[in-house]
Image (spheres, rainbow, N blue to C red):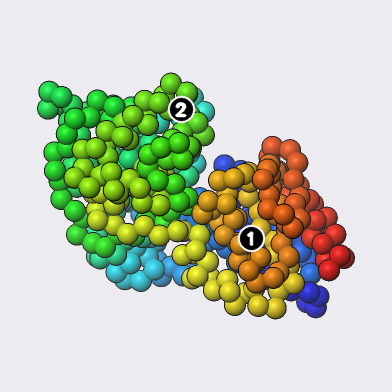
């Protein structure tokens, strides 16, 4: 097809459209607007990570683990090569994991990351010596201690009794029974750069996980206790990304000696976005809800930054959008779109922008 080349970077719209559905809708929109689409699948470490990297996986395996409410669930793991496994943590502890959560089940006081630790251990048992863990889309705020229980770490109260699982009991934490580090190199792909503690810490996302104002305070206090109980916890808590996935970033640092890296940049580098931008006249990216957090390491903000640096105009399509950077064309409105509406709104915005160009 002839026409100006338009780069589409597609990602899932949380709890509504998969990465593939978004990609197909935006590809059709570009064609209807008279453009020639080039589509990249993206993720920032959260929803849709394995879908975005599907073409790069040599195989998938699946394992029986416990979900965030301690129910049995079967979760896939992707393999980038024979020794490198890819874990999408939200599939075991996310709002939209295989088991799914009803609205009345969203309670980060009780939800646990244990299943993520089990997935990592299963991958190691199957030969992985490097495990990449996507962080994002979680419904947990236990600082990764549930995950760490898999490796023998145990949170104890003042009397030396093991605490129940979940983020709520951590406010009673007084010491940790030491476990071991997993026998593999771990890398956490962070969807945000938030630290663990403070007003911009993991608590920033407590409400979307189902926390009340009172629960948010309790959860924040629990994460403070968790950091205080680690020898270098206060230092690790300041690491960008430590607050990702309800503090699971911190858990990977503290209990697995992991490395944290921005997930969006990691995925886009593997997709060679710089080469894709060369010669493109327009970039199109979408997100279910765009706000100031989208500019703090999430895929949409990183794509817009790449486009700006390359001097390529951009179109953002998002049902909800506030705080959009100057110069970005926006298609927005309503709280939720299905694929046909996404296609329709994107077509109009892309067509209008191409005419201006």
Would residue 253 be visible to someone looking at this image?
yes
The quarter holding residue 350 reads bottom right
Mark 2 neighbour class, 10 Å CA radius: few under 14, some 14 to 19, many 20 or more: many
Give the mark nearer the N terminus: 2 vs 1.
Answer: 2
Q: Secondary structure at mark 2?
A: loop
Query: Visible in this render: residue 112?
Result: no
Task: Write the residue at 81% across / 75% down.
Answer: 3
2 vs 1, front mark = 1
Q: Compared with residue 255, is residue 104 higher up or lower down, i.e. above or below?
A: above
What separation in Å lies between label 2 and label 1 (alpha carbons)? 31 Å
Q: Residue at x 78, y 74 (%)?
A: 4
Q: Secondary structure at mark 1?
A: helix
Give the x, y percent position of residue 137.
48, 44
Rendering quarter of residue 185: bottom left
Residue 266: % across, % down:
46, 65
Of 97 and 175, which appears nearest the observer? 175
**Residue 66 screen position, x and y as percent:** 32, 40
Residue at image position (60%, 66%) is: 306
Q: Please give left or right for residue 272 compared with residue 223 in the image.
A: right
In the picture, the quarter occupied by the N terminus is bottom right
Disc on res. 304: 1
Q: Which residue is mark 2?
A: 211
Left or right of residue 211, residue 174 in this image: left
Q: Quadrant of residue 83?
A: bottom left
């Amino acid at each position: 097809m002839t026409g100006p080349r338009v780069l589409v970077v597609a990602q899932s719209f949380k709890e509504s459209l998969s990465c593939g559905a978004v990609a197909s809708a935006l590809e059709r929109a570009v064609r209807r607007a008279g453009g020639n689409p080039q589509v990249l699948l993206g993720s920032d470490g959260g929803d849709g990570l394995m879908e975005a990297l599907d073409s790069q996986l040599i195989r998938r395996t699946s394992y029986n683990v416990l979900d965030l409410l301690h129910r049995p669930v079967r979760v896939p793991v992707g393999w980038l090569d024979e020794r490198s496994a890819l874990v999408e943590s939200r599939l075991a502890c996310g709002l939209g994991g295989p088991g799914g959560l009803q609205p009345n089940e969203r309670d980060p006081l009780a939800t646990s990351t244990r299943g993520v630790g089990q997935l990592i251990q299963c991958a190691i048992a199957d030969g992985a010596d490097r495990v990449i863990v996507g962080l994002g889309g979680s419904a947990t705020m236990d600082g990764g201690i549930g995950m760490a229980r898999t490796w023998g770490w145990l949170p104890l109260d003042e009397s030396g009794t093991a605490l129940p699982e979940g983020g709520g009991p951590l406010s009673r934490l007084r010491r940790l029974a030491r476990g071991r580090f997993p026998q593999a190199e771990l890398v956490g792909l962070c969807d945000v750069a938030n630290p663990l503690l403070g007003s911009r810490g993991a608590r920033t996302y407590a409400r979307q996980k189902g926390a009340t104002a009172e629960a948010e305070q309790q959860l924040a206090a629990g994460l403070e206790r968790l950091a205080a109980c680690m020898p270098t916890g206060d230092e690790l808590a300041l690491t960008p990304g430590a607050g990702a996935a309800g503090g699971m970033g911190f858990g990977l640092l503290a209990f697995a000696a992991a490395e944290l890296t921005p997930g969006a940049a990691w995925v886009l580098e593997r997709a060679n976005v710089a080469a894709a931008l060369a010669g493109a006249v327009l970039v199109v990216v979408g997100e279910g809800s765009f706000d100031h957090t989208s500019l703090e390491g999430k895929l949409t903000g990183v794509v817009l930054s790449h486009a700006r640096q390359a001097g390529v105009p951009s179109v953002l399509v998002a049902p909800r959008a506030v705080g959009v950077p100057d110069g970005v064309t926006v298609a927005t409105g309503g709280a939720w779109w299905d694929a046909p509406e996404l296609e329709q709104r994107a077509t109009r915005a892309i067509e209008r922008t191409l005419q201006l160009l």
